[in-house]
Image: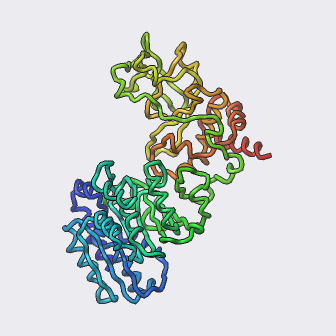
Amino acid sequence: MLSVLEQRRVALSRSTDAARKAKLGQFLTPASTATFMAGLFTNTQGEQCRLLDAGAGIGSLSCAFLEQCATGKLCFGHVDVEAFEIDHALHAELERSLSGFTGRLPLDFEINAKDFIEEAVRRIIYGHGSNFTHAILNPPYKKIGNGSYHRRIMQDVKIEVVNLYAAFVALAIALMAEGGQLVAIIPRSFCNGPYYRPFRDYLRRKTALRRMHLFESRNTAFKDDGVLQENLILHLEVGGRQEAVVVSHSLDDQFTDLAVQAYPFARIVVPTDSERCIHVPQGDSGAEALSAVCTHTLSELGISVSTGPVVDFRLREYLRDLPEPGTIPLLYPGHFGAQALEWPKVGLRKPNAIQRNPATEKWLYPNGHYCVVRRFSSKEEKRRIFASVVRPDAFADATMLGFENHLNVFHDGKHGLPAALARGLAVYLNTSTVDRGFRSFNGHTQVNATDLKVIKYPSREMLMELGASVTEVPQDQHAIDALVKEISEHGKR
């Protein structure tokens, strides 16, 4: 049954226009992933199962769940399925898929063509929810605008989200009974960042996290649809008591290299983290080796980090390709290579300078020592965090500097740092341990100032010692890691 359904899914995926997929945020679930997801439900031996499949597509997830029931891995006296699918073009396939189980199970199903968000909000407001015992979801992936209809009506039930996938998961939870189980595959973008914090808080208030599975390759979970992002599978229990969380990883949707390990919840959401970021640990990430000495926030160290304040397109009339009288250096990520800062850089295709005048003055920093981190990296790069040092002697007689918006800048009240502290920060941030820790809660190729505030740092004294031990930030990864390990071990003694 599932193999036939998979053939239909592949054919449909290949024949559906990419623009239509993007419009609906619709990416159908491969059979291997659907089977894995359905296998995460625990058998509660309930008499009645009420299954919700919101964004059902052609029924891959519902059918994987029903296959678990048909083979006795899940046992219910009766199964009712409500499958929401707004795309009428899929209804015939969806009905054919679900009908295939009517002779194998005590089953009733309903295909609901209504807008799931609208219908779920209506049921919650009028008290018709809280009756689903199970939910299995591959929700649509699409942003919700601030003034959109969906954003407005969800505020009526006190749910704040910025993406359809978060909306579907939150509303599904609101429609479930106590003890209900939900399994969903969603992008891991919700794990960090201020925009998703209300959603993270909602999950913590309403559910217990039982299982997380991460696909380590960004292009395999929905490879037929060309989706490029890291995806997580979540298993949640509504109203459950939070205990240890089982975390698994696989490179792709074949699960041949499946690695599974349980972690205390404090490793998933650090109790002292005000952002409540969700970490996806992978074995011994090396965090324990530095945890004894890396306990400080940037504010405790007297260090600030900000996004580079110069937004070039807003100040275009003041930009200059090369320095000239009346200008000061303007630094882009392209000025920071593998070896050292290069300024001015001919052929960069970005300006090297900006005029200093009353219109630009408030965006400039005094010349000094700074640590900078690129905000964007490519998916092929080995590290997400690339830190470099700005030295004042690189700019001759310049008294001020401009930092472009694609850089994060570590500073002291918009002034430079002590030279050793700037170097120590750069060395520490370039370690493999910091990079792995960062990847545990951030699935993007983007590094924001908010993310850098989440990271814990060694003491100011240890960073100064680290910076004093080198004249330049090492480029060799083994040398960086060995240096930080030596300093940290010395600090623990």
Q: Nearer the viewer, residue 332 or 412?
A: 412
Q: Position of residue 376 (x, y in %)?
A: 45, 40
Q: Position of residue 421 (x, y in %)?
A: 65, 31
Image coloring type: rainbow
Residue lying at the far right in this picture: please name it. 493
Residue 250 shows in this picture? no
Q: Height in image: 464 above or below 317?
A: below
Q: Quadrant of residue 397?
A: top right
Residue 234 shows in this picture? yes
**Which residue: 45% across, 20% down?**
361
Q: Height in image: 434 above or below 252?
A: above
Q: Position of residue 292 (x, y in %)?
A: 71, 50
Q: Quadrant of the N terminus?
A: bottom left
**Total numbered labels placed on residues in the image:** 0
Q: Quadrant of residue 469?
A: top right
Residue lying at the far front in this picture: please name it. 126
Q: Height in image: 82 above or below 328?
A: below
Q: Is residue 271 left or right of residue 157?
A: right
Q: Is residue 256 left or right of residue 371?
A: left
Q: Position of residue 121 (x, y in %)?
A: 32, 65
**Which residue: 61% across, 39% down?**
298
Q: Quadrant of residue 254?
A: bottom left
**Which residue: 58% across, 51% down?**
273
**Which residue: 45% across, 25% down?**
363
